[in-house]
Image: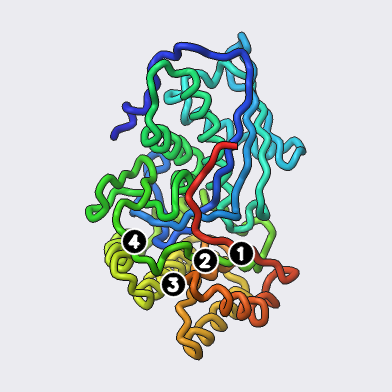
Amino acid sequence: MTETQFLPDSYTQQPEQGSVSWKSPSNIALIKYWGKYGEQLPQNASVSFTLSNCFTETKLSYASKDSKGYDFEVYLDGQREPGFEPKILQFFERVENYLAFLQNYSFRIETSNSFPHSSGIASSASGMSALALCLMDMERSMSGAEMTDDFFNHKASFLARLGSGSACRSIEGPLVVWGEHPVIDGSSNLFGIKYPLDVHENFNNYQDTILLVDKGEKQVSSTIGHGLMQDHPYAERRFATANSNLSKLRLVFGNGDMDAFIEIVESEALQLHAMMMTSLPYFILMKPNTLEIINRIWQYRKQTGSKICFTLDAGANVHVLYPEAEMTDVSSFIQSNLAQFCKNGSYINDHAGLGASRL
């Protein structure tokens, strides 16, 4: 597909008012996307687990108007949140060519998260994907032609990407690939696709416990972090390594090699942070408790033979990944050995999910 395939046909009807609601999950990348070009296009392909319990619920209410221009208000947990509105305005400006009705309505965007905002659990991914799905729901109701689910999902992912790159991986699940890659048929820089190949039963209902080391605002926004890759001395090598790791992970998903999975996923997480530590300006996003948790995971794995591992986003929190068969033992280990390093002992038990849903 190309961008032109997402340009709208004429709308056969435009309702005076209404509302639509969607729930969309966050996701956690196994192969990291870090560095972009053009309009939110990835420098390397990535693959992620879609989550289930970490999600955003968004209600989009709309009423027709005669004046031109964008007209919207954003509410977080029932409170007006003007700080979000510049990002929504930028999003509307980017997607207007693909949603020709945007200036015909006044919008009220009511949103809430099941997890702490801006704490490294990709609230922009779940939030922007939920909003994109609401807008696509509007467009589908206005269109005279039948819209397939595949087209709906691809365009929703395409739109979500223009708000937040990783948001394009939150539409479907449990595994989603974003970025053109020679060994993944149908992969695209324009939108995420559900992983199209067979996946070994070892990865069914994979568990992710998110240890909330720091529940405050991220030290560096993802936008700034991606920008630091443009002149990064190791950027090209990093992009090539990520694509190579996705090729390796494709084999792992097929054969169920858990040790190889651990090696790839943990290496990817540490490379992401290495890029931030070697940029200009440079940042250390991990906290002392992040490192303590990582070391304890390594010790536990060595002592028990567990297939537990970790990954990180661009922040201090730790995603503890493990197979469903180990849920009881790993949960006990987290409670007794890792929770003490979390802010107020807080963590979220999650698992791979199936993507967004209409409310």
Q: Is residue 81 left or right of residue 359?
A: right
Q: Where is residue 104 shown, x and y percent of the image?
A: 56, 15
First along the sequence among labels 4 and 3: 4
Q: Type of residue at label 1? A: Asn
First along the sequence among labels 2 and 4: 4
Residue picked out by circle 2: 207
Which mark is drawn over residue 266? 3
Q: For mark 2, does the 10 Å Cα neighbourhood hold few (<14), some (14 to 19), or many (20 or more) residues?
A: many
For image coordinates 45% across by 35% down, the residue present is 156
First along the sequence among labels 1 and 4: 4
For image coordinates 65% across by 39% down, the residue present is 84
Q: Are marks 2 and 1 in contact (CB under 8 Å)?
A: yes
Judged from the image, the secondary structure of the residue bearing numbered disc 1 is: strand
Residue 240 makes an appearance in the image: no
Q: Is residue 348 left or right of residue 249?
A: right
Judged from the image, the secondary structure of the residue bearing numbered disc 3 is: helix
Q: Image quarter for residue 29?
A: bottom left
Q: CA distance from mark 2 to mark 1?
A: 8 Å
Q: CA distance from mark 3 to mark 2?
A: 15 Å
Residue 85 makes an appearance in the image: yes
First along the sequence among labels 3 and 2: 2
Q: CA distance from mark 2 to mark 4?
A: 15 Å
User: Which image quadrant: the C terminus?
Assistant: top right
Q: CA distance from mark 1 to mark 4?
A: 23 Å
Which mark is nearer the camera, 3 or 1? 1
Which mark is drawn over residue 4? none
